[in-house]
Amino acid sequence: MKKNNNRGLFWSFVVMFVVLLLDQVLKIWVKTNMSLGQEIPVIGKWFKLLFIENNGMAFGWFGGGGFLKLALSLFRIVAIVVLLIVIFRLSKRNTKFGVLFGLALITAGAMGNIIDSVFYGRIFSESTFAQIATLFPDGGGYAGWLHGRVVDMLYFPIIDVAKENASWLPNFFFGPDGHFIFFRPIFNLADAAITIGVFYMLIFQWKWLKNL
């Protein structure tokens, strides 16, 4: 019984390590190879790398600077600690790996974005629309500890319709550019891990959630 628990815990950490590694490798590459706002087509017009930064949560929600940014960073750290404790405790109760897998995805996603918030302001120079950031710049980073901006780059404008071609749609469907775009949010692999983990838990582990 204990062996199975340890195996589940081990594979949970493997999942977290792989997600973190892929997330950080892509972010560092984008940060050191692309200027802010630059886009690189990946699959035609439907999948692009578009470099932006945000102070908020997943998909740039609840963004802000100053105290709000600090509070958000501290909240993420507390959430990660709580999630890790939950994973450890559940592994000791012989909880099935499916539950640990979903929680590992969510935890890894939170960890991926908190790394940006804690360290990126210290180890990178400023990214601008005209300048690519450098790693460990001589003049120091662009912000203090816990005030780094999260790097986002995954953009899937699968549907892009100008307002004049879809006048039957309500105005709130259109952005400032006069286009209806699905999917408009720009995100990163950490955001994707959190989203997949949450939906996975709700769809496939709902019986376990119901018994909490």
Image (tube, rainbow, N blue to C red):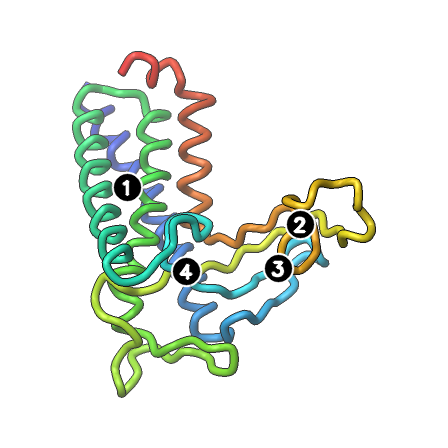
User: For the residues marked 1 and 2, what is the alpha-carbon distance in whole angstroms?
Assistant: 42 Å
Choose mark 4 or mark 1, whichever is in front.
Answer: 4
Closest to the camera, between mark 2 and mark 4, is 2
The residue that disc 2 covers is 174
Could you tell me the amino acid type at mark 1? Phe
Mark 4 vs mark 1: which is more N-terminal? 1
Q: Residue at x 54, y 55 (%)?
A: 154
The residue at the point 43 percent across, 24 percent down is: 202
Q: Residue at x 64, y 55 (%)?
A: 47
Q: Cβ–Cβ below 8 Å for labels 4 and 1?
A: no
- For label 2, the SS is loop
Relative image position of residue 194 (x, y in whole percent):
40, 41
Residue on which disc 4 sits: 54
Which callout, 3 or 2, points to the residue nearer the camera? 2
Residue 121, located in which quarter of the rendered image?
Answer: bottom left
**Which residue sits at x=30%, y=65%?**
148
Tell me the residue that label 3 is attached to: 48
First in sequence: mark 3 or mark 4?
Answer: 3
Tell me the amino acid under the disc marked 3.
Lys
Image height check: is 107 above or below 144? above
Q: Quadrant of the N terminus?
A: top left
Q: How far is disc 3 from disc 2 in space, using C-alphas?
A: 20 Å
Contact? badges 3 and 4 (CB < 8 Å): no
Mark nearer the N terminus (1 vs 3):
1
Q: Answer few, some or many: residues within 10 Å of disc 3's Cα (few below 14, many 20 plus, some between 14 and 19).
A: some
Pick out the residue farthest to the bottom: 138
Q: Which residue is mark 1?
A: 13
Cα–Cα gap, marks 2 and 4? 22 Å
At label 2, counting other C-alpha atoms closer than 10 Å, the crowd grade (few under 14, some 14-19, many 20 or more) is some
